[in-house]
Image: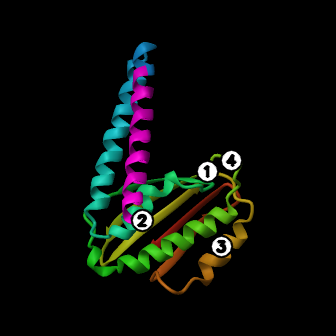
Amino acid sequence: MNELLNVINVIQNTRHDWLNRIQLIKAYISLGKLDQAERVINEIVLDTQNEAKLTNLKLPQFAVILLTHNWGKYAFKIEYEIVDNIRTDIVDDTVLTNWTQTFFNELNRCADPLSENHLYITLEQLNDNIHFQYHYSGLLDNSSQLIGWLTEEKSFPKEITIQEANDSEMVIDVFC
């Protein structure tokens, strides 16, 4: 029964997202702003291509977290891009998912809930590693707490590098 409710929830949220996008396109067309309507359509195409790449990674638990994150009550929204073909046989889906969920929870604790906060995630293959780049843009109430967690976290990734960190932007490279 719980699984059926999850499926219904996914359908409801997906339908809501699509209706919002269609209404936005219709509004731009009715206002004669065809370039804006085309921009939204191009964004939809790009998002759909990234969703297809994500679901083809053979990391189903990780994919679910990214696909459903923006439906939750987080203080930040995510966008992601899969750059190229990625060898997913070198990472455990459950371990990656657990680390990602913990990272999102830590980031959520530090993100200012009244600000517009975004986390851009890029996945790419670099030699024998999967490279995740997390680029946070928004306000952080306590960036040092998040930096502390990242530097102390030893359970999963091979390497975490903090490229930039302040109260409005953070760039983190994670190698698995």
Helix, strand or loop at label 4? It is loop
Q: Nearer the viewer, mark 3 or mark 2?
A: 2
Query: Does 16 lie within the magenta span?
Result: yes
Image quarter where the C terminus lies is bottom left
Residue that numbered label 1 is attached to = 117
Residue that numbered label 2 is attached to = 2
- Residue at position x 39%, y 68% in the image: 62
In the rendered structure, find residue 131 and report the number of the disc placed on it: none
Disc 4 crowd, CA 10 A, few/some/many (<14, 14-19, 20+): few
Q: CA distance from mark 2 to mark 1?
A: 31 Å
Residue that numbered label 4 is attached to = 115
Percent position of residue 32, x then y: 42, 13
Answer yes or no: do the residues labelled 2 and 1 have beta carbons within 8 Å? no
Name the amino acid type tagged 4: Ser
Please tell me which of labels 4 and 3 falls first in the chain.
4
Helix, strand or loop at label 3? It is helix
Q: Nearer the viewer, mark 4 or mark 3?
A: 4
Answer yes or no: do the residues labelled 4 and 1 have beta carbons within 8 Å? yes
Horizontal side of residue 70 vs 15, given as left or right: right
Q: For the view shown, which residue lies furthest in the right direction? A: 141
Please tell me which of labels 3 and 2 falls first in the chain.
2
Name the amino acid type tagged 2: Asn
Q: Nearer the viewer, mark 4 or mark 2?
A: 2
Q: CA distance from mark 4 to mark 2?
A: 34 Å
